[in-house]
Structures are given as structure tokens and as C-alpha cells.
Image (spheres, helix red, strand yellow):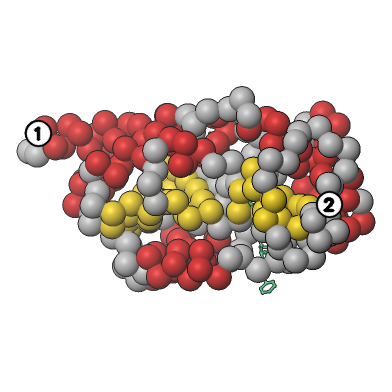
Amino acid sequence: MQREIEKVAKLVARAQMVVVLTGAGVSRESGIPTFREAQTGVWANYDPERLATPEGFLADPPLVWRWYDSRRAILADVKPNPGHYAIAEMEKIVAKVLVVTQNIDGLHAKAGSTDVIELHGNITEFHCFDAGHAADDVPFGLEAPPLCHCGSMLRPAVVWFGEALPTAAIHRSTREAQKADVVFVVGTSGLVYPAASIPYIAKDAGAALIEVNPEDTPHTDIADVFLRGPSGEILPRIIEACKSLHSDPSA
Ligand code: BV8
């Protein structure tokens, strides 16, 4: 693995522009269950892909509200892990690092990444279902969605299945992916579109593709380097290898 890590470090050290696509796996070592891991506790019998839809919300607003409330409550105590910090530190090595995340936990910004696109929104923000009016200071522990001043139910400001991603977010992610020298794909099962198309777009435009995941995914076949393991361990090793390169370019 170390030889592969040093190969990646050389690619990063030479890069002008790196795009890092992340999924729930990058937050796993912060203690947040991944999206497709069996839901735990009271949520074990619910399919997240059914709850994370407008239909699921309208079918049972209190249930979906409580599901997001329980996930938001977990966030209150979690911190970025070494994987998030390594991605933030990459900004000291590469002129331009863009993080494109599917996660809604806000941990990349907390770790210090300065250019983050949240493709699927953010669980700590809210707007109303019918008109999109923003709402803040929404208390924890409510049994059902509170109402907006316009009378519509509030919902988390996340992108549900069947909903379009924010246009600016997906357009910018696609545009930057086409300019990247290196694209990292970290902690995503690569199943959800259009986010999962970003590595293909970058690769087709000439980027080197580096995947970090304990398991194979649909992206593994097109990866130039596949680093099998947890991102919280692997990403810091890449940053360390970049620093050694910097101090001893002959390495
Ligand atoms: C849309 C927010 C159209 C809510 C989420 C083709 C083209 C376009 C759309 C589609 C298409 N085919 C199908 C679709 C529809 C759908 C889709 O992709 N379905 C899939 C399931 C087939 N896409 C959509 O509906 C999207 N919208 O296309 O709209 C449109 C256009 C115009 C007008 C109207 C509509 C919207 C998709 C967004 C859905 N919202 N989240 C919430 O979170 O509650 S997506 C959800 O999945 C999560 O956000 C999650 O981030 C995302 C992806 O999952 P992952 O992050 O990859 O997580 P997962 O658990 O799957 O995997 C974790 C990985 O981590 C694993 O690989 C594991 O091995 C690894 N791991 C574990 N531990 C570690 C680790 N890695 C590193 N380190 C570790 N320690």
C-alpha cells in the first residue's frame, strides 16, 4: 500500500487542481453510520431510500421529521475525523482543491475545507415544503414538522430522491471535474446519480482517479489507484507522503 500511497502523493504534488468527491464513508470514523449501513435502533425497519423522498415525507410527515431529527441530534456531538482534516490540509499542497460532497453533515467545512459543494444539501438547514421559505432556529425533539409562516410544513434542506440537485451545485461540480488533474473518490458506494457521474466526467477529461474505500464500488474499475481501507487512515498517509516529497524531492 505504501508504494501506491507514494504514487498518489507524486500525482497530488504535481497537480494544480484536485476535486474530492466524498460520500457517507468519509464521516464513518466520526461515528456517523453510512447511508446504506443497516439503520440502527428504532430505524432498523425503515428503508432510508423510502424515507428520503417527498412521497415518504407526505405519507408520514412526523415519521420522516423524527428520522431527520434523530440524525441531526447525532451531529451535535460528532467532530471531523483525520480524513476530513487531511482533505482540508491538501489545500496547503495544491493550488486549488474543490470538495464535492454528498454528505449533509457539514463536517468538511468544520475541518477547514474552504471550497465545499454540498450536492445533497445540509441537514441543519430547513425550508418549507410548498414554497421553499428558509427557516432557522428549529428546535430538536419535535414530534412532527413545525409550520412555516406561510402555513406549509417545514422540511430539512436536503435533496431527496426524485428531487433535482441545486443547479449551480451540479453545474459547477461538473465544470470543475473537467478541469481536475486528480479526482479523489472517497467513501461512496457510487450508486447515487448524478453525483456518481462526477468521477467518470473527470476521468474522461484526463484526470487521474484515486479511490479510497474499504470495499470495491462501480468506480473501482476506472480507478488509476484504488486504496482499500478507511479514509481516516489512508488520507493522512497521503498528506504525510506529500510532505516527505516536499522535504526530499528525490524521494
Ligand atoms: C435526481 C440526502 C432528477 C438525503 C441523498 C440517473 C440519473 C439521474 C438520477 C437517477 C439516475 N438513476 C436513478 C436516479 C434517481 C436517483 C438515484 O440515483 N437513485 C439510486 C439509488 C439508483 N437520484 C436522484 O433521485 C437524485 N435526483 O436525479 O433528480 C430530477 C431532475 C430534474 C427534476 C426532478 C428530478 C437525487 C439524489 C440525492 C438523494 N439524497 N441524500 C439524506 O441523506 O437523507 S442521497 C444519499 O445517498 C446520501 O446523501 C448519501 O450521501 C448518498 C450516497 O450514498 P453514499 O454517500 O455513497 O453512502 P453509502 O452508505 O451508499 O456508501 C458508503 C460508502 O462508504 C461505502 O462504499 C462503504 O464501503 C464506504 N465506507 C464505509 N466506511 C468507510 C468507507 N469509506 C471510507 N472510509 C471508511 N471508514
Quadrant occupied by the N terminus: top left
Q: Residue at x 64, y 43 (%)?
A: 124
Q: Which residue does the numbered mark 2 point to in the structure image?
A: 147
Residue 174 vs 85, above or below: the answer is: below
Q: Who is closer to the viewer here, 219 or 231?
A: 231
- Residue placed at 23% from the left, 43% from the top? 93
Q: Residue furthest front?
A: 149
The label shown at residue 197 is none
Q: Is residue 117 left or right of residue 85?
A: right
Mark 1 Cβ and ligand 1 under 8 Å apart: no
Q: Is residue 21 left or right of residue 9?
A: right
Q: Secondary structure at mark 1?
A: loop
Question: Badge 1: how crowded within 10 Å, few (<14), some, or many (20+)?
Answer: few
Give me the residue at 56% from left, 58% from top.
Answer: 119
Question: Which residue was labeled with disc 1?
Answer: 248
Pick whichever, 195 or 222, lies toward us.
Answer: 195
Q: Locate residue 34, reporting x and y percent.
A: 64, 39
What's the amino acid at mark 1?
Asp
Residue kind at label 2, given as amino acid type = Leu
